[in-house]
């Protein structure tokens, strides 16, 4: 197996490092998503329906966040930031 890895060239030898880097980027994306979700994504409690909702209304009390982005927009922004940071880090490291 070691001979096969050596024959495959440096791309296969770098695989564990790339996997670790990919895992780090995934963690970064998760942290960005959580931070954005907690700060700019509205979350409220509807006393009429007795559940947490993502839009304000007459029977809703704000729990956290502001009404800036919905969940889809938070996911888009966090994915875009993660990809941009990851690409910049890859260019800098490779």
Image (cartoon, rainbow, N blue to C red):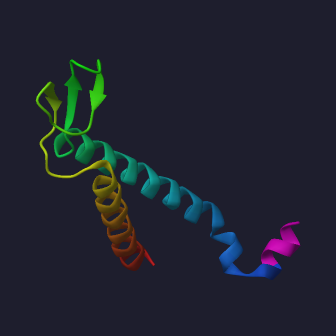
Image side of residue 14 versus residue 20, left or right: right
Identity of the residue drawn at 29% across and 61% down = 77
Q: Quadrant of residue 8?
A: bottom right
Q: Which residues are magenta?
A: 1-6
- Above or below, 20 relative to 92: above
- Above or below, 53 relative to 66: above
Q: Find out whether residue 5 is within the magenta segment.
A: yes
Q: Quadrant of residue 35?
A: top left
- Above or below, 5 relative to 56: below
Q: Depth check: 44 or 2 in front?
A: 44
Q: Depth check: 29 or 93 in front?
A: 29
Image side of residue 15 versus residue 23, left or right: right
Quadrant of the snapshot with the C terminus: bottom left
Q: Position of residue 18 (x, y in %)?
A: 56, 65
Q: Position of residue 41 (x, y in %)?
A: 21, 44
Identity of the residue drawn at 30% across and 50% down = 32
Q: Position of residue 48 (x, y in %)?
A: 23, 19
Q: Quadrant of residue 82?
A: bottom left
Q: Find out whether residue 37 is within the magenta segment.
A: no
- Above or below, 54 relative to 30: above
Identity of the residue drawn at 46% across and 54% down = 26
Identity of the residue drawn at 64% across and 66% down = 15
Q: Position of residue 60 (x, y in %)?
A: 15, 27
Q: How many marks?
A: 0
Image side of residue 86 versus residue 7, left or right: left
**What secondary structure do most residues of the magenta stretch adopt?**
helix
Quadrant of the snapshot with the N terminus: bottom right
């Amino acid at each position: 197996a070691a001979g096969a890895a050596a024959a495959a060239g440096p791309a296969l030898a770098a695989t564990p490092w790339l996997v670790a880097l990919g895992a780090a980027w995934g963690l970064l994306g998760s942290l960005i998503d959580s931070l954005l979700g907690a700060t700019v994504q509205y979350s409220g409690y509807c006393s009429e329906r007795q559940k947490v909702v993502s839009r304000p209304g007459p029977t809703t009390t704000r729990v956290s966040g502001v009404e800036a982005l919905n969940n889809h927009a938070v996911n888009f922004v966090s994915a875009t930031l993660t990809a941009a940071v990851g690409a910049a880090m890859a260019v800098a490291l490779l």
